[in-house]
Amino acid sequence: MTLTHDQLNGLYTAIVTPLTGDGAVDVKALHQLVRFQLDAGAAGIVPIGGTGEYPAFSRDERRRIVAACVEAADGKPVIPGVLSTGFEDALEAGRDFAAAGAAAVMTVTPYYAPGTQDGMRAYFRRYRDALDLPVMLYQIPRRTTVAAFADTVQAMAEDGSIIGMKYSSYDMPDFIRTVKYAGDKIAILSGEEPLFATHVALGARGGVLASATIYPKIWIEIFELARQGKLKEALKLQDKVDPVIDSIYVETNPGPLKEYMALAGMPVGGVRLPLTGPSDQTMAKLRVAAAQAKAISLA
C-alpha cells in the first residue's frame, strides 16, 4: 500500500532492530515486535531509522529488515527511515524499500553537505520524482545540524515532494510556524516524547516514537487525550512514562532502549558498532526506571 497525507494519523512506532547473540538480524523477534505494536493499536511501523540502527546495516540487510516488517505488518503501513547522506545512496535505499513493499519512506534532511534551503527543497523534489513513492521529511537537527525552515516545508508540501514529516526538535516557535504554514497540507508527526502531547494539541496528527517500542498502548492513550483537547490529562498520563524516557536517552539511542527492553521482559539483543552497551551508571538508571514501571504496571 501507499499513503496519502490524510492517512497519516496516530502512533507510528520507531522500532529497534532485534539482533541474535552473534549480531545477526533476528527475523523471528522482528516479526514478534511488529505484531506487538500493531496488536496494541499502532497505526504503522517505522523500521531502520535511527532507532533501527540504519548506519550499522548493509544494503541487503536493510532491504531484508523492511521486507520482514512488511510481511509481519499484514497490510498496515511500513515507513522505513532513510538516513543516507547522499542523494544516490538515499535513492538506492528508497527503491529497495519500495520493492520490499514499503508504504512510504521517511528521509532525513541531507547533511554533512546540506546546501541551502533552495537546495534542500530541490533535493526532495528530485527524490520524490525519481522514487515514485510517498516521502516523509525527517527533521532532526540535533543529529544533522540542519533543518528545513517552515516556509521551505510549506513549499515542499505545495509542490508534492512530501506527504508528512517527523518533527524531532524542541524548537516550539518553529513547530508552531510549521503547523501554521503546512499543517493543512501534510501530516506533521511529533518525534519528541516529552513534547508529544503538546505537539498533538498544537496540530500534530500523531507521532513517530521510539519508546512506543516498549509501551505503545500508553502513547496511544496520550495521543487520544491530546487530540481531544485534554492536554492536562495527557500530560498527567505522560508523567508515568517520563522516568523511562529520561533513562533510555541518557546515551545514544537505541543502546539504552534495547537494554531497557530486556529488563522489561522483551529481549532484543545488543547493538552494533560504533554503538556499545550502556555504561554501569546508565544501567543503574535503567534498572530504577524499569522497577518503577513494574510497580505501577506501566503498559
Image (cartoon, rainbow, N blue to C red):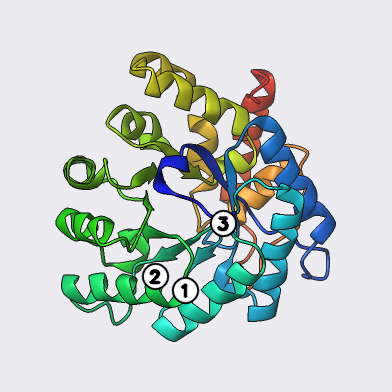
Residue receiving disc 1: 131
Number of numbered discs visible in the structure rendering? 3
- Which label was assigned to residue 106? none
Left or right of 92? Residue 119 is: left
Measure how far apart labels 3 and 2 are at the Cα level: 14 Å
Q: Amino acid at mark 1?
A: Leu
- Which label was assigned to residue 128? 2
Q: Amino acid at mark 2?
A: Arg
Callout 1: SS: helix
Q: Residues within 10 Å of mark 2 (few under 14, many from 20)?
A: some
Find out whether the residues at labels 3 and 1 contact each other: C-beta distance under 8 Å.
no
Q: Quadrant of residue 275?
A: bottom right
Going from N to C along the chain, the mark reached first, 3 or 1, is: 3
Measure how far apart labels 3 and 1 are at the Cα level: 12 Å
Residue located at (48% from left, 39% from top):
246
Q: Is residue 201 above or below residue 57?
A: above
Image location of residue 55, percent across then percent down? 55, 73
- Which label was assigned to residue 103? 3
Residue located at (63% from left, 31% from top):
41
Q: Residues within 10 Å of mark 1 (few under 14, many from 20)?
A: some
Find out whether the residues at labels 1 and 2 contact each other: C-beta distance under 8 Å.
yes
Q: Quadrant of residue 38?
A: top right
